[in-house]
Amino acid sequence: MTDLPELELYTFWRSSATFRVRVALNLKQMSATEKVINIDAGEQRSAAFLRINPLGGLPTLVEAGHPPITQSLAILEFLEETRPLPALLPADRHGRARVRSLCGMLASDTHPLITPRVRKYLTTEGGFDDAAWRRWQTQWFGVGLTAVEERLACEPQTGLFCHGDTVGMADICLASLVAVMRVFKIEVPNTPTIARILASCSALDAFAHAEPGRQVGAPG
Ligand SMILES: N[C@@H](CCC(=O)N[C@@H](CS)C(=O)NCC(=O)O)C(=O)O
């Protein structure tokens, strides 16, 4: 792969946003050297990592000689432009808008509510105990997935995957949310279209190899 840039990916095994990038790299047969930032040990708040990603979030992708790229959706778009095939976005602009909209519902509106920094704030400043945090996670994962299910179930563009019969960015975002729900043992609401699409995703090596439990640092 001499035509491809040398990449480093800052990761943590159970990071949902990092899962997205791993799947995209796998689908595009690209590779990145992983650098583990241990969220459980608070390494994302270290001065060294905050210089790379001032919000202290994973993932971050670095191409030698260029500024770090933060935000998983920006990274997915960067990978798409770096290696266009297989395409993770549809060819038509309405299709691309739909896929980006589904990605936004999952990665921008749902996932941020359950990140470690939100947990830290709610448990130290907001009076949340473990049970309250669990209810919070269940609530916001549930709201996000139910809304996405409503769209996927009734929009004609839905196919074997979120958009047509080809795997793409919306599937990656969908699978990333459910992967972390499984890690935290959060019950997935009854969402049959999502369940069917996730079964198609899980059958692909690109998704299977990105599973949190298979990453460096995952509990045995
Ligand atoms: N919107 C960001 C989310 C980044 C993010 O919050 N990542 C989580 C892991 S999935 C994280 O590193 N959290 C650290 C913290 O909240 O302290 C993205 O899509 O990259």
Image (cartoon, rainbow, N blue to C red):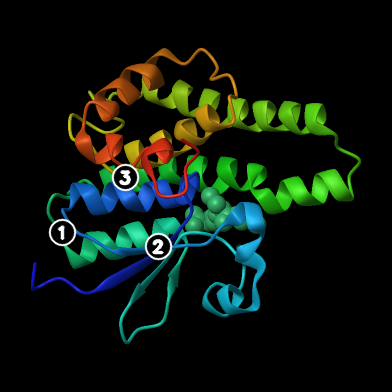
Task: Indicate which disc, 1 or 3, sits on the residue closer to the N terminus.
Answer: 1
What kind of residue is marked 2?
Answer: Ala
Few, some or many residues within 10 Å of mark 3 (<14, 14–19, 20+): many
Percent across and percent down for residue 86 are 13, 49
Looking at the rendered structure, the number of numbered marks drawn on it comes to 3
Say whether marks 1 and 3 touch (CB < 8 Å): no
Q: Which quadrant of the figure shows ligand 1?
A: bottom right
Kind of element beneath mark 3: helix
Whole-number angstrom distance, CA of label 3 to CA of label 2: 11 Å
- Label 2 C-beta lies within 8 Å of the nearest ligand 1 atom: yes
Indicate left or right for 126 with 93 as reference.
right
Q: Name the residue under label 2.
A: 74
Indicate left or right for 177 with 201 as reference.
right
What kind of residue is marked 1?
Answer: Pro
Kind of element beneath mark 1: loop
Percent across and percent down for residue 136 are 73, 32
Q: Name the residue under label 1.
A: 84
What kind of residue is marked 3?
Answer: Met
Q: Name the residue under label 3.
A: 169
Kindly identify the residue that appears in the image at 72 percent across and 49 percent down: 118
Task: Indicate which disc, 2 or 1, sits on the residue closer to the N terminus.
Answer: 2
Percent across and percent down for residue 49 are 56, 73
